[in-house]
Image (cartoon, helix red, strand yellow):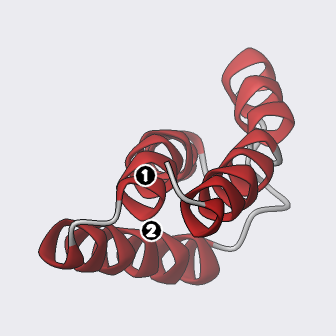
Amino acid sequence: MSGIEILGFAAAILTTVCWLPQAFRTIRTKDTRSISLFAQGILTLGIVLWLIYGILVDSAPIIFSNAINFVLVGLILALKVRYG
């Protein structure tokens, strides 16, 4: 693994971990009042596009982080739609 890939995985881990508290809180409380549906939808779409890009350029850090982030952010979006 190259130094660039290690840097990419470090960035991927940090940006993925930052969503865990929000996802856990939203799942636990089902409170989505302070979350913008529009912004969450755009964020989810952006993550999907990053995931597709990562697959096309075969970048493991981009695929790793955006696959996990898609699950977390997509779950928050689904809870917003259901309970918002």
User: From what the image shows, is residue 59 above or below residue 79?
Assistant: below
Say which quarter of the image contains residue 83: top right
Say which quarter of the image contains residue 20: top right
In the rendered structure, the answer to whether residue 64 lies left or right of residue 2 reads left
User: From what the image shows, is residue 83 above or below residue 49?
Assistant: above
Whether label 2 touches label 1, CB < 8 Å: yes
Would residue 24 be seen by someone viewing this image from the given angle? yes
Mark 2 secondary-structure assignment? helix
* Of the pair 61 and 25, the residue shown nearer to us: 61
At a point 21% along the width and 66% down the height, the residue shown is 58
Mark 1 secondary-structure assignment? helix
* Of the pair 77 and 48, the residue shown nearer to us: 48
At a point 30% along the width and 71% down the height, the residue shown is 54
- Amino acid residing under circle 2: Thr
Q: Which residue is mark 2?
A: 44
User: From what the image shows, is residue 20 above or below residue 10?
Assistant: above
Q: Residue furthest top?
A: 28
At a point 85% along the width and 33% down the height, the residue shown is 21
Q: Which residue is mark 1?
A: 70
All told, the count of numbered labels is 2
Say which quarter of the image contains residue 50: bottom left
- Amino acid residing under circle 1: Phe
Q: Position of residue 29 (x, y in %)?
A: 80, 22
Instruction: Measure how far apart labels 2 and 1 are at the Cα level.
Output: 6 Å
Q: Position of residue 82 (x, y in %)?
A: 46, 42
At a point 54% along the width and 58% down the height, the residue shown is 2
User: From what the image shows, is residue 46 above or below residue 17?
Assistant: below
